[in-house]
Structure formats: C-alpha cells, structure tokens
Image (spheres, helix red, strand yellow):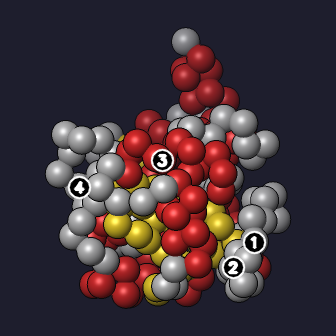
Amino acid sequence: MTIDDVITALRGGPEHSVEEARSLASAEPGLYSWWADPRSLPSEVPRVPHPETRRALIYVGVAPASATSRGNLARRLRAHTKGPIGSSTLRRGLAALLYEEKGWRPVWASTRPGLESRDLALSAWQVENLTVRWCVHTEPWAVEPAVIAAMVPPMNLEHNHANPFHATMSARREKFRLAAEVRRDGLPIDQAVAARGR
C-alpha cells in the first residue's frame, strides 16, 4: 500500500462511529484518521475539511508506533474512545482544547493530567461529535510522517512542526497540564508557573 493509497483510505474509506470503533476495528496494524463535527470545535482549531462530508480532520495516528510494539488498530482505537486520557494523545489533546469551554475540571491522575469523573464527559462528547476511518498497513510507523505531512491534522504534534497550529496546540496542552498540577499541589497559579520555570 502506497502513501497515496493510505491517504485515500483515511479520507474516503468507511466512516465509523465511536461505538463501532470500539467493536469493529481490526486487530491488525494500520493507520486511522479522526474527524469531528466542526461546529463542536473551538473556533481557533483549523478546519481541514473532508472532501465529501461536513466533517473536519483533527488527528491521524498509527498502531503500533514501532516494529517492537504489540499494539494494533483495535487496541488503539479503544484507548482513544474510553478510559484514562493519560493513555491517549487524542483524548489529552481534546481535553486541553475543550476543558475551559465545557467546564471540565483537570486533575492529576497518577503521572499525567486527567479529568474529574473518570473522563466520562469527554467520552460522551466524542460519541456525539467524532467519527473515524482506518486502514490496515503492515508498517504504519514507516509512512506516518509522510501521511501527517500530506493530511495536515491540526491536533498532531509529532511529525507536524510545520503546521501553523502546532504552537497553539502545544500551548493548550501545557496550560491543561499546569491546571492539573495546580489542583494537585494546591498552589496559586502564579506560584505554579514559577515552580515550572525553575
């Protein structure tokens, strides 16, 4: 499968709901693309429109991330649709973009930021607003950089430094992390920022 074939599949392959992603995804390696109702996104998030639907591309990922990983599409997509946000870059990014608007409260969960109520509000938001496409590929990590460069998903940070939204996405994730640390440590925000700068 060429890079063009992968991009075609991630743009034009079957569209699945979050519920379908939890149960139908293949236990094989591959790539996936997440699409959102653009009305559900903060206005600052760039709209990368789908060629045929009203959805907007937000994220592209691979499973596994390397030849030594045992991950697969089914496991990765389940991680992206439920459970702690610490195990999903997509969920952490969505939480960082949405928590202030939605009134969700960041907390410190073990070694990473999380949300109160076991991230259930985020899961419900995903069910309502996201769909996903995927394709099988024997070495998805080998084509990931080229696919991200071509598709320009706004929420990806790795392999996506040229994206104009990269700095904003990084800042939003850092702000979310800091908000979780403030609640963990009980520090005023200015003291927390100073502590991070040491």
Residue 144, disc: 3
Q: Earlier in the sequence, mark 1 or mark 4?
A: 1
Q: Decide which of 23, 50 is in the foreground and name it.
A: 50
Q: Residue at x 32, y 49 (%)?
A: 139
In the rendered structure, are the residues bearing label 1 and label 4 in contact, judged by CB atoms less than 8 Å apart? no
Q: Judging from the image, what secondary structure is the residue with disc 1 in?
A: loop
Number of marks drawn? 4
Residue 82, disc: none
Q: Residue at x 57, y 59 (%)?
A: 4
Q: Amino acid at mark 3?
A: Glu
Q: Residue at x 69, y 79 (%)?
A: 55
Quadrant holding the C terminus: top right
In the rendered structure, are the residues bearing label 1 and label 2 in contact, judged by CB atoms less than 8 Å apart? yes
Q: Earlier in the sequence, mark 3 or mark 4?
A: 4
Q: CA distance from mark 2 to mark 4?
A: 27 Å
Which callout, 2 or 3, points to the residue nearer the camera? 3
Q: Judging from the image, what secondary structure is the residue with disc 2 in?
A: loop
**Vertically, is 156 above or below 125?**
above
Q: Residues within 10 Å of mark 4 (few under 14, many from 20)?
A: some
Question: Looking at the picture, how far across and down is residue 37, in whole percent?
Answer: 68, 80
Q: Residues within 10 Å of mark 2 (few under 14, many from 20)?
A: many
Residue tagged by mark 2? 55
Residue tagged by mark 4? 71
